[in-house]
Image (cartoon, helix red, strand yellow):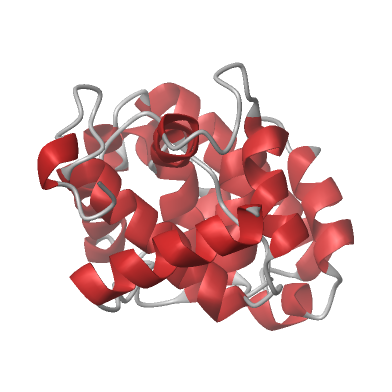
Amino acid sequence: MVSTQLRKIYTTLFKEFGPQHWWPGETSFEVMVGAILTQNTNWSNVEKAITNIKNAGLLDPKKLLKLPDQRLASLIRPAGYFNIKAKRLKNFLRYFVDKYGGSVASMKKVSLERLRTELLEVNGIGQETADSILLYALDKPIFVCDAYTYRILTRHGLVDKNAVYNDLQEPFMDSLKHDAKFFNEFHALIVRVGKEYCKPVPRCSECPLK
C-alpha cells in the first residue's frame, strides 16, 4: 500500500536525520522571495541574493515593487538568471501587493485551493514554486515535489518514470494526512537524502532507504 510505503520512508529518514527545521528564512515574506529565487540554482546562491536585499534595507514587498528592474536584478545577481528572476519576482510582488496589500496575514486567511489557482496565474510561478510558497510561507498543507521527489519515488517504484508533477504529488495528497508541519518535514527529509545519497548517480548501498 502506497501510504504504508510513504510512512516507512518518512519514519526511516526521520530516524536517520532528525528534524530539518525548514524552510531557511527569518520571515514568511523572505521565504516567498527565496522560493522564486531558488529556481534553477542552489540555496547558497539564494542566500547571497537575499543578503544583498537585506543589506540594502529593501526586504519589503512594497519597497521591492517600486525598485527599478535593473536595480533589483543587480541585487539578486548571485541567484543566477537575474534578469528573468527580477521580472518573475516583480510579477509576484505586484500580485501580492495589489491583491493582499503585501500582508502575509491577509493571504493566510484565503483557502489553499484559491491561493494555488491565483499563484499559478502569476507569470513565472510554476507548481513547485507555488506549493513552496503555500507550504513554507503560508503554512498550507500541500506537498512540495521536486527533482529529489522524482528520483526517490521512481527508484522505489512508487510512480512511473514518465511521471509529471501532479503524478508525484498525488500519492502524498491522497494517502497521507493533510498536515503542513508533517508535509514540511517530509519534503525536507526527501531533499536531505536526495542531496546526500539519491544523487543522479545514486549511493544506494549507503542510503538509509536501501
Quarter the N terminus occupies: bottom right
Q: Is residue 53 visible to us here? A: yes
Q: Residue furthest left?
A: 206
Q: Residue furthest front?
A: 1
* Image position of 21 (left or right of 161): left
Query: Quarter-wise, where is residue 30 in the image?
Result: bottom left
Query: Quarter-wise, where is residue 137 in the image?
Result: bottom right
Q: Residue at x 63, y 72 (%)?
A: 138
Q: Residue at x 67, y 67 (%)?
A: 176
User: Which sits in the foreground, 16 or 34?
Assistant: 16
Tag count: 0
Q: Is residue 156 above or below residue 35?
A: above
* Image position of 187 (left or right of 49): right
Position in image of residue 115 (x %, y %): 81, 59
Q: Residue at x 26, y 51 (%)?
A: 193
User: Which sits in the foreground, 68 or 163?
Assistant: 163
Position in image of residue 52 (x %, y %): 23, 53
Q: Is residue 45 visible to us here? A: no
